[in-house]
Amino acid sequence: MSQPSADLPLSALRVLDCASYIAGPAAATVLSDFGADVIKIEPPEGDPFRRLVPGVSYPWDLDSRNKRSLSLDLKRPEGIAVLHRLLATTDVFITNLPLPARRRLGIDAHTLCAAFPRLIYASMTAYGESGDEADKTGFDATAYWARSGLADLVKADHTSAPTRSVTGMGDHPSAMALYGAIMTALYLRERSGRGGEVRSSLMANGLWANGSFAQAALNGTPPPLRAPREQAPNPIANIYQCADGRWINITILNERQFPALCEALERPELAGDPRFATADARAIHHDALIAVFDQRFVSMPLAHWRERLDAVGITFSLIGSLADLATDAQMRAVGALVPYAEGEGLTVNSPIELVGRPKRVPSRAPETVGRDSRLVLSEAGFTPAEIDALCESGTVRQS
């Protein structure tokens, strides 16, 4: 793996990633992008995240980049003893193990923060750490996507079945919340000299993501029922299909841009049509205007409409597909996609920049379980004989 440069902002930070599936490890990945030394604690059989998708490892590739793998059996007292020795020189401990498992293993926040007063204990849970559901397990598909109402709100229309999420869709935004909590705690530690516990949950992050409509409902004004695309109440904030099968999303909030849109669509007379001249009129005659727009957009390919819409300053985007990513010049230009240090392939960068300060060139995730076990333990002061004994007992695995 590539070693972080000393000029990276978090190069002096030591992090233990004792988490899986996905928000906890992803928060550690962001720390690693800024130079933190992240040690991935894996059970002897390996993190189950490695096997999330049979035959491939792309989720592991993304959320375990830059990390060193230490295979440690925390079900053994010897494993907990090793963990405690590592924690003596650790700044941040990240976990999303279920709360009962943490208490059973003795790695709950109360225990570790008492033993290591400067430690930042970063906890991610499904439903929070109080209330009747604190001990419930959950994933982003359940606690973030389903529980928050997002699955119900983004379906095609109000008569459709709720939509399913995709892998990591709620986990990665939740990871950013945990990252922010960790950095806040580190700032406070600089001032007080003491660490502490920080928390976030998938449910709270899902609610925050759905905050606008959630607040509306809490105020007694739930949003209107979602209409099919062809009946969308605002035709200038809708999606349309082009001649080549690609879709385009237009979002116009400035009333003054409607004539420009009509000009771009080569139907300037629509701007003066009494049925469409104002937002209220368009809302009444939305179906007629959508039908006209459908006819125009489907007459020419995406490239044609991109040029014309850009020329008049309309806010829009193509509906991207995964096949577009590798050739997306803008994503490469801003560093949203970056090459691996090993020289082949791209990875998704974390969405934070510190202007004037570089980020780490990402190295690939450890391919084997416990790849760095001996090195990590040696750095922590374990003798070769102690390491041999831990490996022979099965407490540590080196591969």
Image (cartoon, rainbow, N blue to C red):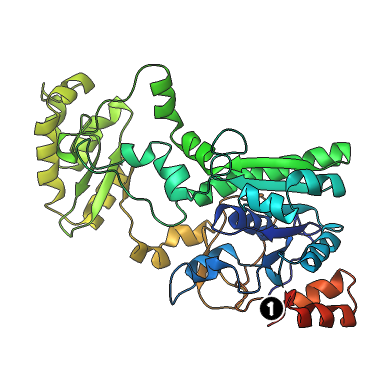
Image-based side of 202 in relation to 78, left or right: left
Image quadrant for the C terminus? bottom right
Residue denoted by label 1: 371
Q: Secondary structure at mark 1?
A: loop
Residue 228: tell me if it is visible.
yes
Q: Is residue 60 left or right of residue 254?
A: right
Q: How many marks overall?
A: 1
Toward the viewer: 131 or 307?
131
Q: Say whether residue 215 is left or right of residue 136.
A: left
Residue 285: x, y in percent?
Answer: 12, 26
Is residue 338 shown to the viewer in this render? no
Quadrant location of the N terminus in the rendered image: bottom right
Image point (50%, 65%), residue name: 59
Q: Quadrant of residue 378?
A: bottom right
Residue at the (15%, 25%) spot, across then down: 276
Residue 342 position within the rendered picture, expressed as x and y whole percent measured from the top left: 60, 78
Query: Toward which corner of the image does residue 320 lie, by quadrant?
Result: bottom left
Q: Residue 304 appears at what percent x and percent y?
A: 22, 54
**Mark 1 surroundings: few (<14), some (14-19) or many (≥20) residues within 10 A:** some
Q: Between 96 and 344, which is closer to the camera in this rendering?
A: 96
Residue furthest top in the image: 220
Q: Please tell me whether residue 379 is drawn above or below residue 179 in the rendered image.
A: below
Residue under the image location 86 percent in, 41 percent down: 194
In the image, 148 versus 271, the foreground residue is 148
